[in-house]
Structures are given as structure tokens and as C-alpha cells.
Amino acid sequence: MKCSIMKKVALITGITGFAGSHLAELLLKEGYEVHGIVRWRSRSENVSHLNGSLHLVEADLQDLRSLQDTMMSIRPEFVFHLAAQSYVPASWTSPSATFETNVIGSCNLFESIRTAQIDPVIQIACSSEEYGLVHPGEVPIKETNPLRPLSPYAVSKAAMDYMGYQYFKSYDLKIIRTRGFNHEGPRRGEVFVTSTFAKQIAMIEKGLQEPKIYTGDLSASRDFTDVRDMVRGYYLAALKCTPGEVYNICSQKAWVIKDVLKHLLSLSKIKGIKIVPDPKRMRPSDVPLLLGDGRKFARVSGWKPRIKFTQTLEDTLNYWRDRV
């Protein structure tokens, strides 16, 4: 009789989302048994191609009892906490809902793990937005930089970040905090910057939109990483990093948003597309520059980006060409 090899069990919150779906693919390739928390109304198109490979369980970050039942039944060895209200402009219009999801939801997750008396490694996806107002002499941004968040979203992620530290110190939960800088790629929601540009270009190419592309502020600079590299970083963090510590995951290169748009337009089959500023896409306050120092994470994990951002942009545009 052949002995079956027990697979390691991983649980992903936000598995049907942008990064969660890519992480699920990676973990399956690495031989893990992958479980994901979904709500009954969750959209599943990002993981539909993985149907039959995943174990999806209905639970809600706002419902502590459902999370406790999930932890008791699955008993994961790794938990990747990616679920969030992650769209910064939405946090201005719905700050309380953002806090309920990102802060209360995270607290419920940590409590469910603590009360289930299990001991998984827990990677939590924090954000570079927490750094907020960064002074010129503080770039590239190290993990030790003060947090000066400039949006309700950023405040909520800072609260989750520190809550992770508190649960590590108070209850010995093996929580590893990763502050991911901007990550883009296929399956990115259409409201996010590279994806909204790519979708509009795809619609223009098919005659579904007049040859005008609507934009917000194009002057900000961001440190972009391909989502497939980012989730590989999450995975390596869970394997190699020290609980209680915080790690930047970033490319250490900045792109001005107007140059992102310029490159996407250079890939378009339609020339002469006009750029139209849209006041509705402007934020009450914005972070002018986010450029990370990722050396701490690279030293511990050996991680470095593999996919060039120009490839990320091309893949994102092709993703929308297939869908509009």
C-alpha cells in the first residue's frame, strides 16, 4: 500500500480577489491544500478556472462565530490574510465600512485563530499607503519610517498592522506583517489606476468608448510590482520571515502615473487618444511619492521581482481586450 503524503494546509482570506486568486494558483503549484473564505455573495470569476482544486468555505469577517467554526474545522498551518476594502477613493465615501472590513474583520480573524487554539503562520497584507506623508529625505522608505496615513484606507491598514503586532506580543500569534507597495496585473479591479487605463483603451479599440481616456491626478509616483511577484513575496514571507516583524515588498523603482499611461497608450491599436482630466477621479489628499526600500525583505527571503513592469502593463491590457 502506498503511503499518501499529507499536504500542508493553507487558508486565504480574499481568495476570490485580485491578489488572492494569484496566491491560490501559486500555492496549488507548490502542492498545498488550499482553502478560501468566501461570503455567499462573493464573485468567483477570478478563481473559476481553479474549480475543483480549491476548498471554499462560507464565512464572514464580520461574523466571529463563522470564523471560529472555520478555524476549528480546517486547522490551517498557514493563513494569508488578504481580504480588505482596498480601494482608496471608496474609503473617503465609506470610511466606516472600510474600518469594519479592515479593522474589525482583522480583529475577528485574529480572535478566531486565538480561541481555536491553533498555531498557524499568519501573513497579513498591510500597505505602503500607511506611510502616507513621506518627507523628501525619507525616500526610499524603510520599515522604520513614521506612519502618517493620508486616507481612511491608510488609517485602517495602519490599525490592522499594529493590531497584528499586538496579537503577536500579547498572544504569541505568529503574525508576519508585509507592507506591499502598489501591485498590478491581470484581474486587477477596473477602478484601480493601471486597470482603468487599460480597460478604457480596450473599449476604445472596440469602438465602445470615444477616443478619450479619463484620468485622475497623473503626477504621483508609485513603486509598482507585478501581482504574481507580490504573492510570491507573501508566500516567501510565511516561509522565511520572523513573526512580529514588518517587511516592505517592493520593486525599489518608481513610475510616474503619467508615464504608466503613456506606455499603455503606446501599446494601443488606436492612435491619437485624448487625455481628459476627470474631477471625480481626484482625491481629497494624495500621497505624491511612494518608493520603497525592500532590502530587509530581500535579505531574509531572497525575493526579487522577476516580471518587468512593462510586461505587467501589456498583460493587463490584453486581459481587458479579452473581456470588453
Image (cartoon, rainbow, N blue to C red):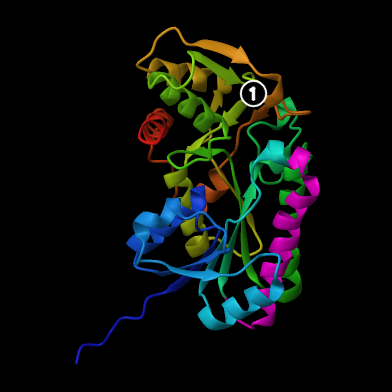
Is 122 drawn above or below residue 262 in the view shown? below
Q: Looking at the picture, how far across and down is residue 305, in whole percent?
A: 43, 41
Q: Amino acid at mark 1?
A: Ala
* Observer able to see residue 145: no
Q: Is residue 168 above or below residue 201?
A: below
- Residue bearing the label numbered 1: 220
Looking at the image, residue 36 sits to the left or right of residue 72; the answer is left
> Main SS type for the magenta part?
helix
Residue 185 picture location, percent across and down: 45, 38
Measuring 60% from the left and 56% from the top, which residue is drawn there?
83
* Quarter location, residue 271: top left
**Residue extending furthest toward the left:** 1
Q: Nearer the viewer, residue 96 or 40?
A: 40
Which of 105 and 119 lies nearest the eye of the viewer? 105
Magenta extent: 91-119
Give the residue displayed 64% in from the left and 18% down from the top.
219
Where, quadrant-wise, is the N terminus in this rendering?
A: bottom left
- Crowding at label 1, few (<14), some or many (≥20) Cα neighbours within 10 Å? some
Between 97 and 263, the one lying in front of the other is 97
x and y, in percent, of residue 285 in the image: 77, 28
Spot occupied by residue 260 in the image (x, y as percentages of width and height): 50, 22
- Please say whether residue 2 is one of the residues in the magenta stretch: no
Task: Specify the farthest residue to the top.
Answer: 272
Where is 240 relative to 202, above or below? below
The stretch drawn in magenta includes residue 98: yes
Q: Tell me the residue at 42%/40% (across/down).
A: 186
Q: Secondary structure at mark 1?
A: loop
| Residue 156 appears in the figure | yes
| Labels in figure, total | 1
Q: Residue at x 49, y 62 (%)?
A: 240
Quadrant in which the C terminus is drawn? top left
Q: Which quadrant holds residue 69?
A: bottom right
